[in-house]
Image (cartoon, helix red, strand yellow):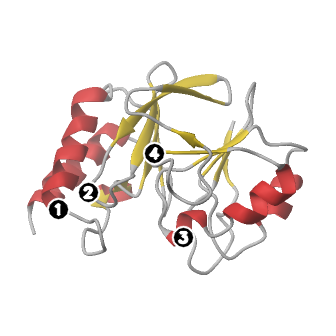
């Protein structure tokens, strides 16, 4: 099961997805809300925190989580404060009951990754793609529009067209034609 436990919070935070099953994992930590309380309301432990990238709105609550649950953190750049284990491109990591492939997708930030499970058709897109064809900012440090376009195109080549769920770092998850959302983002990112 996948639940966005940041859905009802306000302020400057990312979505925080609790993925339960064989391995209970949080995708991103969020910022500025009681994430520990929200996790404890739902489960009694965490097996890992997996980061799509390390912008402050995605990692602000990281220390609270690691203190409360004594949990290891996985991210693309092992030299980043708080990251215990490296997620390498095309490696496999288990979230809940499914195996996800790590896809290095820079352009929004150098350490950005997406997580894709082909069998259930689920994609955690971080801040690369949002509902309605939105895409991540490239005006911040490490942002690069052309690299972002290349990362979106990599998703189009990798993800199956029957993708069933796209969970973005902000906004709503996409369950109606999520592959079409990736196509829209690819076109939109090229225009500007």
Q: Which comes sooner in the sequence, label 4 or label 1? A: 4
What label sits on residue 107 in the rendered view? 2
User: What residue is disc 4 on?
Assistant: 76
How many angstroms separate mark 3 from mark 2 (CA)? 17 Å
Q: Marks 4 and 1, Cα distance to the nearest angstrom? A: 20 Å
Q: Quadrant of residue 108?
A: bottom left
Q: Is label 1 in contact with label 2 (beta carbons under 8 Å)?
A: yes
- All told, the count of numbered labels is 4
Q: Kindly check if marks 4 and 1 are in contact, taking CB atoms under 8 A apart as contact.
A: no
Could you say which is closer to the camera, residue 64 or residue 78? 78
Question: Which dot marks residue 35?
Answer: none
Q: Residue furthest bottom?
A: 11
Q: In which quarter of the image is the N terminus?
A: top right
Q: Earlier in the sequence, mark 4 or mark 2?
A: 4
The residue under label 1 is 145
Q: Do the residues labelled 3 and 4 touch (CB within 8 Å)?
A: no
Q: Whole-percent x and y of residue 52?
A: 48, 50
Q: In which quarter of the image is residue 123?
A: top left
Residue 41, image x, y percentages: 88, 55
Q: Position of residue 57 (x, y in %)?
A: 54, 70
Quarter of the image with the C terminus in it: bottom left
Spatial distance from mark 3 to mark 4, Cα to Cα? 17 Å
- Between discs 1 and 3, the one toward the N terminus: 3
Q: Distance between the residues labelled 4 and 2?
A: 14 Å
Tag 4, which secondary structure? loop
Report the residue marked by disc 3.
Answer: 57
């Amino acid at each position: 099961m996948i639940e966005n436990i940041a859905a009802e919070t306000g302020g400057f935070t990312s979505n925080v997805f609790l993925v339960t099953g064989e391995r209970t994992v949080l995708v991103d930590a969020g910022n500025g809300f009681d994430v520990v309380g929200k996790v404890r309301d739902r489960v009694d432990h965490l097996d890992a925190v997996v980061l799509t990238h390390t912008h402050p709105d995605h990692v602000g609550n990281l220390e609270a989580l690691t203190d409360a649950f004594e949990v290891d953190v996985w991210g693309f750049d092992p030299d980043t404060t708080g990251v215990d284990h490296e997620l390498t491109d095309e490696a496999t990591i288990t979230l809940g009951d499914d195996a996800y492939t790590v896809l290095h997708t820079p352009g929004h930030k150098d350490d950005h990754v997406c997580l894709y499970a082909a069998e259930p058709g689920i994609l955690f897109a971080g801040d690369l793609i949002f509902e309605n064809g939105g895409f991540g900012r490239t005006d911040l440090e490490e942002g690069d529009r052309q690299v972002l376009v290349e990362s979106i195109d990599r998703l189009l080549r990798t993800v199956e067209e029957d993708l069933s769920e796209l969970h973005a770092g902000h906004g709503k998850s996409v369950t109606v034609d999520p592959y079409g959302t990736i196509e829209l983002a690819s076109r939109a990112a090229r225009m500007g």
